[in-house]
């Protein structure tokens, strides 16, 4: 897959191309535009190449100088979207874990088809309350956050009602996820038992990629949520990444298809989950 910041950079390049197009349509060279704005020509070049992000004031000044003031607000909206693509956890969780959980609710509600790949943990839609509590407590302690874990757990549990609605979930897990102990043996036993129950729901499909699968052509990648065909969320060690660039969405959709082909489903998947439960002793 691409590097974590590539989506942001590609989006900035696309914005830069739009700015360049507006300048060209106005019949201005970069030097002429820079003179109008009292900037150095290199500033225009950096904006157009995407190597520097323009401020909202820069964008409005650019549009006005190119007699394209009517396009300013759309450009500003695009720039704000780019700024929101890569959000470090400190910024996202500054107001607590409850707020971070609530922030994705609108996206969840409007999504009909979820495709989820997780190489490290059971994903949110099929987590138990105890598993969620163990995860969020660890995050709170590791990042030194305010203690709103009970409220955050309740938000995530409430979000799970979505699996009983019109939405569909196709979830792929690496087999190692089943044996990654979070919260201790009792919590994991309950979580894996719930995973078996969730797999029986008509809206949920769970595939497990066996540890002995031939990975010559399809390597594990970062975990991701693909919402319909319009958005990908990736949880990185440092930040929450939102991807909306069409060609990158296609890469994640293709990766999901390839990973799906490696997974086992139905009885074979249930056998792997049951074996993991038995391994807890």
Image (cartoon, grey):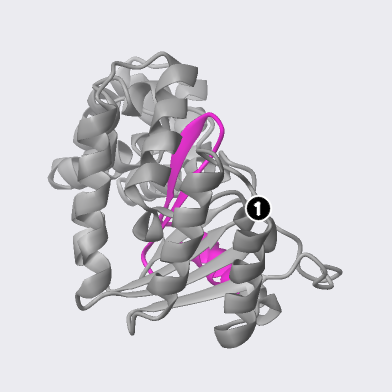
Q: In this view, does 125 lie above or below 61?
A: below
**Would you place residue 51 above or below residue 204 in this image?**
above
Residue 250 position, x and y percent, is 53, 69
Report x, y in % for residue 278: 64, 62
Give the residue displayed 76% in from the left and 61% down from the top. 219
Q: Which residue appears at 48% of the width and 27% of the height?
A: 52
Please say if 112 is above or below 155: below
Q: State the residue at coordinates (62%, 54%).
A: 177
Q: In which quarter of the image is residue 79?
A: top left
**Percent position (x, y) of residue 21?**
38, 50
Which residue is labeled 1 in the image?
281
Question: In the image as oriented, which residue stretches furthest toward the front?
Answer: 281
Query: SS of the residue at dot 1?
Result: loop
Say left or right for 182 vs 231.
Answer: right
Quarter of the image with the N terminus is bottom right
Q: Is residue 207 something that shows in the picture?
A: yes
5 in relation to 203, above or below: above
Per the rendered image, the range of residues in magenta is 229-256
């Amino acid at each position: 897959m691409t590097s974590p910041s590539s989506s942001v950079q590609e989006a900035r390049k696309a914005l830069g191309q739009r700015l360049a197009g507006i300048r060209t349509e106005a019949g201005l060279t970069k030097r002429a535009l820079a003179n109008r704005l009292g900037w150095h020509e290199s500033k225009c070049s950096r904006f157009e190449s995407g190597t520097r992000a323009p401020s909202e004031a820069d964008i409005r000044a650019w549009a006005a100088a190119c007699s394209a003031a009517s396009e300013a607000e759309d450009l500003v909206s695009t720039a704000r979207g780019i700024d929101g693509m890569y959000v470090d956890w400190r910024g996202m969780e500054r107001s607590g874990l409850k707020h971070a959980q609530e922030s994705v609710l609108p996206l969840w509600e409007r999504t009909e088809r979820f495709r989820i790949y997780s190489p490290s943990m059971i994903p949110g839609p099929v987590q138990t309350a105890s598993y969620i509590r163990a995860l969020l407590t660890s995050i709170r302690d590791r990042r030194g956050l305010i203690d709103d874990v009970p409220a955050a757990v309740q938000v995530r549990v409430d979000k799970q009602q979505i699996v009983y609605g019109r939405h569909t979930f196709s979830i792929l897990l690496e087999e190692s996820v089943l044996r990654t102990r979070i919260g201790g043996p009792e919590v994991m036993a309950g979580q894996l038992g719930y995973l078996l129950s969730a797999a029986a729901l008509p809206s949920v499909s769970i595939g497990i990629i066996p540890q002995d699968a031939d990975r010559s052509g399809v390597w594990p990648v970062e975990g991701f949520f693909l919402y319909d065909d319009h958005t990908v969320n990736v949880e990185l060690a440092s930040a929450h990444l939102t991807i909306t660039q069409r060609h990158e969405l296609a890469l994640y959709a293709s990766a999901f298809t390839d990973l799906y082909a490696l997974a086992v489903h139905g009885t074979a998947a249930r056998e792997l989950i049951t074996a993991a439960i038995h391994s807890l002793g």
